[in-house]
Image (cartoon, helix red, strand yellow):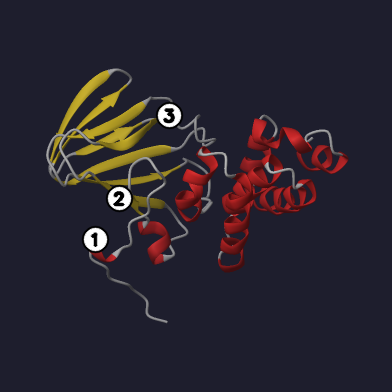
């Protein structure tokens, strides 16, 4: 195995979860130490970065650094506009609500992140992203079927197990949901905490195994 890898931006496959298309750089290279991905807007005015703070994603304390690789972006951070032409770094602390829009066609942003004092956990949300459309449309059974297929090739990612458990719960597949939830929380205590208040898991919440897993 080589000690390095090289890829041009356009050689990394685009992933579309129904919001803003992105390129899963971390997954492409198999990086385990930190998160890094890119987002590219087709047209001026397109949203590039989904609006969020890190509490929304269950990653309290997660810091993010954005770099405008090409084009020009306009960040909105806690209601303030930040102009970011090519070559600009924008650092955002965990509690800040952030989003970004393209000011020019083809604007590309590189996003990197991690949590101070904690080892990075590669949850694999990038693998699940293409199935998000099915989840949003309420097609839970199909999302569960396709998600289970992804697990066979990507068993290292706890978030993939977790998301499959959620759609199985919503589809009424309680035994499968509990099995995959167990795999998720055994790999990630962060997901154990998330499960405690996730309404997607309400169908299995009163099951003794759920209570044993989540508390």
Name of the residue lying farthest toward the top:
79
35 lies left or right of 186: left
User: What residue is rendered at 51% in x and 38% in y?
Assistant: 136
Classify 160 as above or below 92. Answer: below
The quadrant of the picture occupied by the C terminus is top right
Kindly identify which numbered label has been placed on residue 173. Answer: none
Label located before the other in sequence (3 or 1): 1
Residue position for label 1: 9
The residue carrying pointer 3 sits among few (fewer than 14), some (14 to 19) or many (20 or more) residues within 10 Å by Cα, namely many
Which sits earlier in the primary sequence, circle 3 or circle 2? 2
Give the alpha-carbon distance from disc 3 to disc 2, as whole Å. 18 Å
Relative to residue 211, is residue 131 drawn left or right?
left
Q: Residue furthest bottom?
A: 1
For marks 2 and 1, the one nearer the N-term is 1
Give me the C-alpha separation between circle 3 and circle 1.
Answer: 26 Å
- Residue 189 shows in this picture: no
Q: Position of residue 169 (x, y in %)?
A: 71, 42
Q: Mark 2 falls on what kind of element? A: strand
Marks 2 and 1, Cα distance to the nearest angstrom? 9 Å
Q: Secondary structure at mark 1?
A: helix
Labelled pair 2, 1 in contact (Cβ < 8 Å): yes
Q: Which residue is mark 3?
A: 53
Query: What percent of the width, then of the height, locates residue 38?
Result: 30, 50
Q: Nearer the viewer, residue 15 or 212?
A: 15
User: Which residue is identified by label 2?
Assistant: 38
Residue 158 drawn at (x, y percent)? 61, 53
Q: Where residue 139 appears, x then y in whole percent?
A: 57, 44
Q: Nearer the viewer, residue 201 or 64?
A: 201
Which residue is rendered at x = 38% and y = 25% of the image?
A: 96
Q: Nearer the viewer, residue 10 or 69?
A: 10
Q: Is residue 25 above or below residue 139?
A: below
């Amino acid at each position: 195995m080589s000690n390095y890898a090289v890829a041009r931006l356009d050689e990394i496959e685009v992933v579309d979860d129904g919001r803003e298309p992105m390129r899963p750089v971390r997954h492409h290279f198999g990086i385990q130490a930190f998160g890094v991905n890119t987002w590219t807007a087709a047209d001026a005015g397109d949203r590039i970065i989904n609006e969020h703070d890190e509490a929304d994603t269950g990653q309290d304390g997660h810091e993010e650094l954005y770099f405008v690789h090409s084009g020009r972006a306009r960040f909105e951070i806690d209601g303030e506009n930040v102009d970011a032409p090519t070559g600009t770094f924008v650092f955002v602390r965990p509690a800040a609500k952030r989003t970004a829009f393209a000011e020019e066609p083809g604007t590309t942003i590189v996003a990197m992140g991690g949590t101070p004092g904690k080892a990075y956990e590669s949850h694999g949300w990038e693998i699940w992203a293409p199935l998000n459309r099915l989840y949003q449309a309420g097609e839970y059974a199909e999302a569960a079927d396709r998600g289970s297929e992804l697990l066979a090739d990507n068993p290292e990612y706890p978030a993939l197990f977790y998301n499959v458990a959620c759609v199985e719960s919503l589809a009424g597949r309680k035994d499968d949901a509990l099995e995959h939830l167990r795999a998720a929380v055994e790999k990630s205590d962060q997901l154990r905490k998330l499960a405690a208040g996730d309404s997607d898991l309400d169908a299995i919440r009163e099951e003794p195994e759920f209570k044993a897993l989540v508390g």
